[in-house]
Image: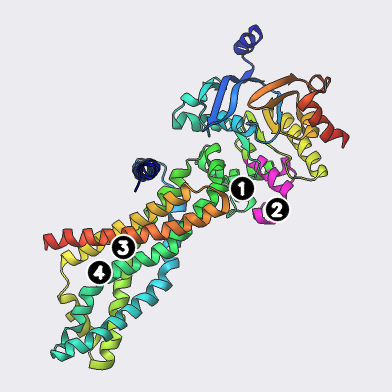
């Protein structure tokens, strides 16, 4: 590369690095503001409950279907290998461990990132570009507390609940498959399944889903809150909310698994 | 200067702006604005699009920070205020957006009740409902309480936007292009409403507009803005007595064509 190109490239790279750290800084400020506002009265209970309904109740159908299918498919896929070694009796515990440790937190988080994260990004983005957030500001209302704190908190609280529900439905799906092939009773299935799950497994799953919920909430609220450029900005906020949330969820998965495996 | 000092000491001055500057990148939007708003007065800020009129009132309400200069509203320096003090000041200053900025997921009644509920948490549902009814009656839309913003016309949205600010009983009203994009009859109705608000709620107002009919109908004083500065100030008749340059273009477009 000649010197002219070098000179042209240098500012672009510098600008990109500056931009990256600037976004990092802004997100850090956004998170700090969340914690500052979250512990100050008054609590916006009605909006918080409405958001819990949006995040939790409205995602139930999707979580139920995907959880059930995951349980059935995982059982079907695992049976041939286990039967080769004559240990199909291990199916309940294998499925339960896989579902509680890894599948349920990931599936519930990815569903919420896609369904709720995009909706938060689009809703807040639309409010931003139509000056509805400014309208709250000038009416002496704290829009951050009303819009952001309620959504992030609802997401952080509801995702663990959805995750445990997803795990239960996954195990139920597995039970139906095991019952159809091995005629196992419900009590015997869950005795087997739960026997192998430790307190640390529940803690890992709970930690993961709290971290994922907070991540989805912060990312989608940040994108919506900072939306610009009219309707194009709204679409971008929704789209980026999903992509960044999913990307961060996978990175966090690796980190959390490493931390808990070192404890195990 | 002497005149400005006199205004500064005048207890009836509710907004006092001195040497206000604001830029966005290389674009110098406001370049040394001075303005006083006296109690019970309607001041119209007139100018072409992009001359910095909306930026001026967004600085007054604290949505934007000035680069230099002071903005004193009801005795408080706006850019020096902390969050809580700024919110307390905003209770006394109503802001009507050009786009109305109604909360589209809420009905008209909920739009009006929202600032009231959030700022007067001890108020009962009955009291809130009564206040909403009074404001809806004052803005001439008593039957729209259950309608969604998407079901309203442009003029109705503007009225509800004004009503939502009036519900907190502000001392000062800031109107951003109240008649923009509306037909002449609706404009006339809105001008009447702005005057009625002044009489009934005893407000002082700054009205941002490029509509000369609106300026003539509602303004006690008119300040013409061009390229971030006031180029002429006075009563409507004084400003338009000598029609030259921008003033002539404005007048001809609004009244001759």
Q: Chain of mark 3?
A: A
Q: Earlier in the sequence, mark 4 or mark 3?
A: 4
Q: Nearer the viewer, mark 2 or mark 4?
A: 4
Give the residue at mark 3.
A160
Q: Position of residue B87 (x, y in %)?
A: 50, 33
- For the residue pair A8 and B24, the one nearer the viewer reads as A8
Give the residue at mark 4.
A102
Q: Is residue B69 left or right of residue B156?
A: left
- For the residue pair A83 and B134, the one nearer the viewer reads as A83
Q: Does B206 appear above or below A203?
A: above
- Callouts 4 and 3 on one subunit: yes
The residue furthest right is B256
Q: Nearer the viewer, mark 4 or mark 3?
A: 4
The numbered disc on residue B102 is 1
- Mark 1–mark 2 CB contact (< 8 Å): yes
The numbered disc on residue B152 is 2
Q: Nearer the viewer, mark 4 or mark 1?
A: 4
Which secondary structure, mark 1?
A: loop
- Callouts 1 and 2 on one subunit: yes
What's the magenta region?
Answer: B136-164
Q: From where the camera sits, is residue A27 visible?
A: no
Q: Residue at x 40, y 42 (%)?
A: A8
Which secondary structure, mark 3?
A: helix
Number of numbered discs on residues: 4
Query: What is the C-alpha distance between the residues marked 2 and 4?
Result: 50 Å
Q: Earlier in the sequence, mark 1 or mark 2?
A: 1
Query: What is the C-alpha distance between the residues marked 1 and 3?
Result: 35 Å
């Amino acid at each position: 590369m000649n010197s002219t190109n070098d000179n042209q490239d240098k500012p672009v790279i510098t600008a990109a690095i500056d931009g990256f750290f600037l976004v990092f800084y802004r997100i850090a400020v956004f998170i700090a503001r969340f914690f500052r506002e979250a512990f100050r009265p008054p609590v916006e209970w009605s909006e918080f409950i409405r958001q819990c309904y949006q995040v939790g109740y409205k995602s139930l159908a999707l979580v139920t279907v995907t959880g059930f299918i995951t349980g059935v498919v995982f059982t079907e896929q695992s049976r041939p290998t286990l039967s080769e070694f004559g240990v199909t009796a291990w199916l309940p515990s294998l499925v339960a461990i896989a579902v509680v440790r890894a599948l349920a937190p990931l599936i519930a988080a990815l569903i919420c990132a896609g369904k709720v994260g995009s909706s938060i990004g689009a809703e807040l983005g639309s409010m931003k570009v139509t000056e509805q957030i400014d309208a709250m500001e000038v009416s002496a209302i704290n829009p951050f507390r009303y819009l952001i704190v309620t959504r992030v908190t609802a997401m952080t609280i509801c995702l663990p609940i959805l995750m445990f529900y997803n795990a239960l439905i996954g195990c139920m799906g597995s039970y139906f498959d095991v019952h159809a092939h091995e005629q196992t009773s419900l009590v015997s299935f869950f005795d087997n399944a739960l026997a192998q799950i430790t307190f640390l497994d529940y803690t890992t799953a709970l930690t993961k889903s709290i971290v994922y919920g907070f991540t989805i909430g912060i990312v989608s609220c940040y994108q919506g809150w900072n939306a610009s450029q009219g309707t194009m900005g709204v679409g971008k906020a929704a789209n980026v909310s999903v992509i960044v949330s999913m990307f961060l969820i996978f990175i966090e998965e690796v980190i959390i698994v490493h931390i808990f495996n070192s404890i195990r | 200067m002497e005149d400005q000092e006199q205004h500064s000491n005048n207890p009836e001055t509710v907004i006092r702006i001195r040497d206000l500057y604001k830029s966005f990148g290389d674009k110098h939007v406001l370049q040394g604005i001075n303005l006083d708003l006296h109690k019970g007065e309607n001041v119209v800020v007139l100018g072409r699009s992009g001359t910095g009129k909306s930026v001026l009132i967004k600085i007054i309400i604290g949505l934007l920070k000035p680069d230099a200069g002071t903005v004193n509203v009801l005795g408080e320096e706006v850019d020096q205020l902390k969050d809580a003090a700024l919110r307390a000041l905003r209770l006394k200053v109503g802001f009507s957006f050009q786009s109305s900025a109604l909360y589209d997921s809420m009905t008209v009644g909920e739009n009006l009740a929202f600032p009231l509920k959030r700022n007067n948490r001890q108020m009962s549902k009955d009291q809130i409902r009564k206040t909403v009814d009074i404001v809806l009656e004052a803005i001439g839309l008593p039957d729209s309480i259950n309608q969604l913003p998407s079901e309203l016309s442009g003029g109705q949205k503007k009225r509800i936007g004004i009503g939502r600010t009036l519900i907190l009983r502000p001392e000062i009203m800031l109107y951003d292009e109240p008649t923009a994009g509306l037909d002449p009859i609706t404009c006339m109705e809105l001008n009447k409403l702005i005057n009625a608000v002044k009489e009934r709620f005893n407000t002082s107002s700054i009205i941002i507009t490029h509509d000369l009919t609106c300026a003539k109908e509602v303004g006690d004083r008119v300040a013409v803005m061009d390229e971030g500065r006031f180029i002429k100030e006075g009563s409507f008749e004084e400003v338009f007595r000598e029609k030259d340059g921008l003033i002539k273009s404005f007048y001809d477009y609004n009244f001759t064509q």
